[in-house]
Each structure stands twice: as C-alpha cells, then as structure tokens.
Image (cartoon, grey):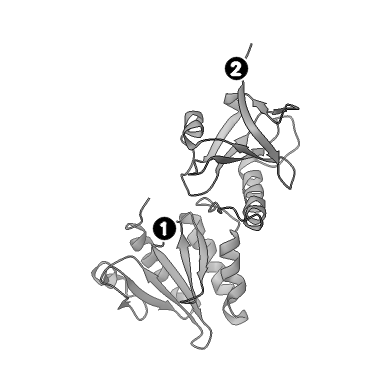
Amino acid sequence: MAMKLVVTDVRKLEGDGLWEAAMEPGEVRVLGPGSGSRAGPSVLLLTGEPTLRPDGQMEVAPLGVEVLNVGNVTRAILISGGTESDDVPALPALAEAQLLAILRTQEERGHALLPLPAGSSTFSRGDLDFVNATPPHLRSLAERLLRAVRREFAGSLAFKAGSGRFVETPDNWWTVKPQPVARSFRFTVRARLAELEDLQLPKLTKDRTDSYSAFVMERDDQLNVVLAGLRRAAQNRKD
C-alpha cells in the first residue's frame, strides 16, 4: 500500500481548493525545504488529489506535496492544484492566484499575513494598500515600482500610522512614503551612505542612524537608479 500523509484538524477556507490544517513547521520541513521561510502559516501545494475524511483529517501522497513556505506558526494553508488530467492553469500561476486569496481572507480573520514570494506577478494586501494610498498622479509610478521590486524581493508592505511610511515586512530593510505635495516618494534603506554614494541616488542623505540612508524618486526615469539602491541595500537584509 502506498504511504499516505495524514493531516489533522483540517478546515475548509473560502475559495475552491483551500484548507487550513494543524501542522508544525518541523513537520513541513520533512516534506521539503520550500521556496522560502516567512512569518505566518506554512503553505503547501497539493499536486495530487487529497482524500477528506469525515473526522476532519486529510490524506495525501507525500510525493504529491510541494512546500511553498515554511512558516513559524502551527498552522498550514493547503492549496489543491488538481491532477495532471485536470483542466487547470499552470501550478505556479494557480498558486499565486490562490495565495492572493489567502492574504485577503486570512487578514479578515486576524491571522498573520504571508508575504508573496519573489517573482510574484500579484500584490499582497499591504502592497495594494500602498498603491491605493498613493495620489492618482503618482499611482502609475507606484505600481511600476512595486512590480519591479516584487520580481526580485519577497515581502509585503505594512503601513505605520505614526510616520506615514509603508515598511517592508517581515524585515524592515526598506520603507517608502508617498509625498503628494512634492510629487515624489521618499525611501529609507538599511545601508550606510558610503555603500550608496557611487549610485548617484536623488537627494541621498543619512537617515535616523548611520546604518540607514534616505533618497527620493521624483520622476519615472529615476526608477532604475532607485532599484539599484534597493538592490544594494538588500545585501543587508536579515533572512
């Protein structure tokens, strides 16, 4: 008989093929290293057909599980990707669409949010909040900025009311603040001035400590140099 993985305390979530289950991070690591390790629930993509039991448990073949995230809480989100014979989108595209649904439904239930992985073509709820909070005359540039950032760096922005900044989570190695009157964005990054001076970033200054610097983006043609600044600062991320 083929070996089966038994998942306990399974509960259906809103949306097709979405469940929540009790799973320790250590149990998830046994199934694979995953494509990332971010705060919040673990995320598993079920490439095989799961079997639901009346007692609230689920059976699935271990070889039919792909680990998308190893979280830090005792919950896991299970995404059914169907079988090869199903008429479904490619698994990466399917997973992205359903991860976005998870971000929205989990926030409404007060749970920690899982940042979308690097390379995602969709925005997390926090990233969408940043775009929506940006004045109309800056919104197109905000979208271009975030799409470029998320192609390279996983994460999700979170608004800090006291400062008006949107801070990267789970590690706040960069922040961004729309400046409607100045028609610009102000960035802070975890990088010393000496690490950035050769890039000719617009209005580069030291921020609140020697370990942080600030610069702005005022025009579309400054996007590439701003991304270069973020890439340099990304070397100081805390993984």
Marking on residue 3: 2
Seen from the viewer's position, the closer of residues 4 and 75 is 75
Marking on residue 171: 1
Marking on residue 62: none
| Side of 99 where 162 appears, left or right | left
Q: Residue at x 64, y 26 (%)?
A: 60
Mark 1–mark 2 Cα distance, whole angstroms, equals 39 Å
| Side of 78 where 154 appears, left or right | left
Is the residue 100 above or below the residue 78 in the image?
below
- The percent coordinates of residue 197 (x first, y second) are 27, 72
Is the residue 176 above or below the residue 22 in the image?
below
The quadrant of the image that shows the N terminus is top right
Is the residue 36 above or below the residue 105 in the image?
above
Report the residue that reaches farthest toward the bottom: 181
- The percent coordinates of residue 228 (x first, y second) are 38, 65
Q: Which amino acid does label 1 sit on?
A: Asp
Is the residue 105 above or below the residue 167 in the image?
above
Q: How many labels does the image show?
A: 2
- The percent coordinates of residue 104 (x first, y second) are 65, 56
- The percent coordinates of residue 154 (x first, y second) are 48, 54
User: CB of mark 1 within 8 Å of CB of mark 2?
Assistant: no
Seen from the viewer's position, the closer of residues 83 and 12 is 12
Query: Mark 1 or 2 closer to N-term?
Result: 2
Q: What residue type is labelled 2?
A: Met
| Side of 13 where 222 appears, left or right | left
Seen from the viewer's position, the closer of residues 10 and 114 is 10
